Image: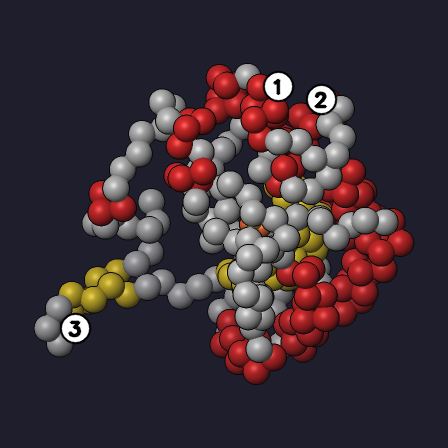
Amino acid sequence: EPTWSRGDSEMRKQIAKPISGGLILSYKCPSQCRHCMYACSPKWKADWISEADLEKILVQLSKYIEPSPYGSQAVSLNNGLHFTGGEPFLNYELLCQAVDIAEKLNIPSTFVETNSYWCTSDELTRERLELLKKKGLKGIMISVNPFYLEYVPFERTERAIRIGQEIFGNNLMVYQLEYYRRFKEAGIKGKVAFEDYFRLEGRDNFVRNVEFFITGRAAYTLKGTFGESFPRYRASHFFSQPCRP
Ligand code: SF4
C-alpha cells in the first residue's frame, strides 16, 4: 500500500514497489478502439522502444517482478510481466528480442497481449507463437470485446485462441472470455461495427451483463451512446482521488 512520509518541505507519497508490469513497446496499433486506454492508433509514429532502453528497463524490473501464485512458469493477469502496446506483433522482431532479454534475466510469468489482427493463417500464427514459446515466453492474452471486433475479423481472434491454446495450454488467457462466448453464440463473422453489436445485445444487456471499462478516449467516443448510463465529470473532479481504490 502507498504510505506517506515527510520530505524536506512537503509530504511525499511513497509509491509501493511494483510486483508486476506491462511493457509498452510502442503506442502504434493497427486498430483504434473506442475504449483504448492509451488512445493508440495507426496514426501514431511508431517510435518503438530502443534495444538499449528495453535492456535497461527489463534489468530494473527483474528485481521486482513476482511470479504468478501458480509459479514462475504460469501466468496470471496481475503478476509477472507482459509485453504490450499498441500492438506488439506489429514489430515481431522487437517482441522476440524483449522475450530473449526477459528470459535471460529470469523474469517470471511473462506473457504477450495481442488483438490478433496478424493471425491471418494457421501457419503464420503457429510459427510465431511457437518461436516465442521456444524463446521462453510463458503465455499469451487474447483481447476480445466489441471494440476490437470493429477492427479485427472474429475468425482471426478464434484462430489465435485455438492455436494459442495448443501452444500455451492453460497459459492462454482470453480477456474477456464472456464476450468470446457471446460472439460464438451469436455466430459473429468478420468485423462488426459497434453500433450493430450494440443493437444485437440491446442497450440494457450491454451495460448489465459483462464487466465493461470505459477508459481512455471512451469518454469522448462513447458519449452519445452511453450518455445517460454513465455520468461525465471534468478531469479536475478526480485530482484528489488515489489511483488505487
Ligand atoms: S487493440 Fe489495444 S492498443 Fe490497439 S487500439 Fe485497441 S485497445 Fe488500444
Q: Choose mark 2 or mark 3, whichever is in front.
A: 2
* Quadrant that contains the C terminus: top left
| Residue 71 in view (yes/no) | no
Please say if 144 is above or below 141: above
Residue type marked 1: Leu
Choose the circle earlier in sequence order: 3 or 1.
3
* Image side of residue 40 versus residue 152, left or right: left
Amino acid, disc 2: Ala
Q: CA distance from mark 3 to mark 1?
A: 56 Å
Q: Which residue is mark 3?
A: 7
Tell me which residue sits at (16%, 73%) in the image: 7
Q: Which residue is mark 1?
A: 200
Q: Which mark is residue 186?
A: 2
143, 191: nearer the viewer: 191
Helix, strand or loop status at disc 3: loop
- At 50% from the left and 19% from the top, the residue drawn is 203
Q: Nearer the viewer, residue 170 or 43?
A: 43
Residue at screen point 33% across, 51% down? 243
**How far, Cα to Cα, is label 2 from label 3?**
58 Å
Mark 3 packing: few (<14 Cα in 10 Å), some, or many (20+)? few
